[in-house]
Image: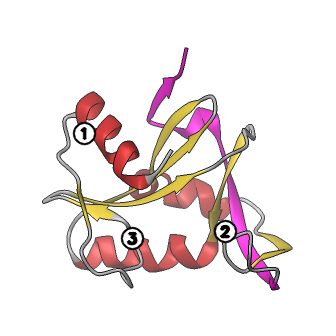
Amino acid sequence: MNELKTLQIINELCKVKLEKTIDKHCSYDAENSNHIAEIKNRRTYYSTKMIEASKLFINYQKAQLKSKTFIYVVTDPKGVYIFNITKLIDDILKQEIVKNIQPSTTDFKNSKKIIKFYYNLKEEMSSFTFVFN
């Protein structure tokens, strides 16, 4: 799945009218008058959904400055999960941060690896879940 298809699904199911950001260097992928959204399309299912600490902090702060809600959208082969980071921030920060060596980008042609810091979000933390049949 790609970002545009994900936006189409979210807009249809949640009636939020998110629009893809025009700036390709923006730290988030979509927004509307009430939300900024980061979208991650994963090819593999994991019971926890990873959110990079840098994306978490940058986009949470941007949402505060814009008086918007920061949502994190994850798709995988099993479904769509929407996390309201603005509501969950205190619970997320109580967790231990994870440090791991991972590819610098999701582009598989790039073999460079770097240390990334992230938090794991449990599926139960999702405020909206749509499971594919």
**Looking at the image, which residue sits at the far top?**
133
Residue 25 highlighted magenta (yes or no): no
Kindly indicate whether the residue at mark 1 contacts the one at mark 3 (C-beta within 8 angstroms). Answer: no
| Mark 1: amino acid | Asn
Rendered residue at 40%/44% (across/down): 6
**Residue 55 x/y as whole percent:** 53, 74
Mark 2 vs mark 3: give the one in front. 2
Residue linked to disc 3: 28
Above or below, 122 against 14 in this view is: below
Measure the C-alpha gap from mark 2 to mark 3.
Answer: 16 Å
Dominant secondary-structure state across the stretch colored magenta: strand
Tell me the magenta residue range.
Answer: 112-133
Measure the C-alpha gap from mark 1 to mark 2.
Answer: 25 Å
Residue linked to disc 1: 11
Residue linked to disc 2: 106
**Residue 23 x/y as whole percent:** 28, 81
Foreground of the two, 42 or 129: 42
* Mark 2 or mark 3: whose residue is earlier in sequence: 3
Circle 2 packing at 10 Å, graded few (<14), some (14-19), many (20+), is: few
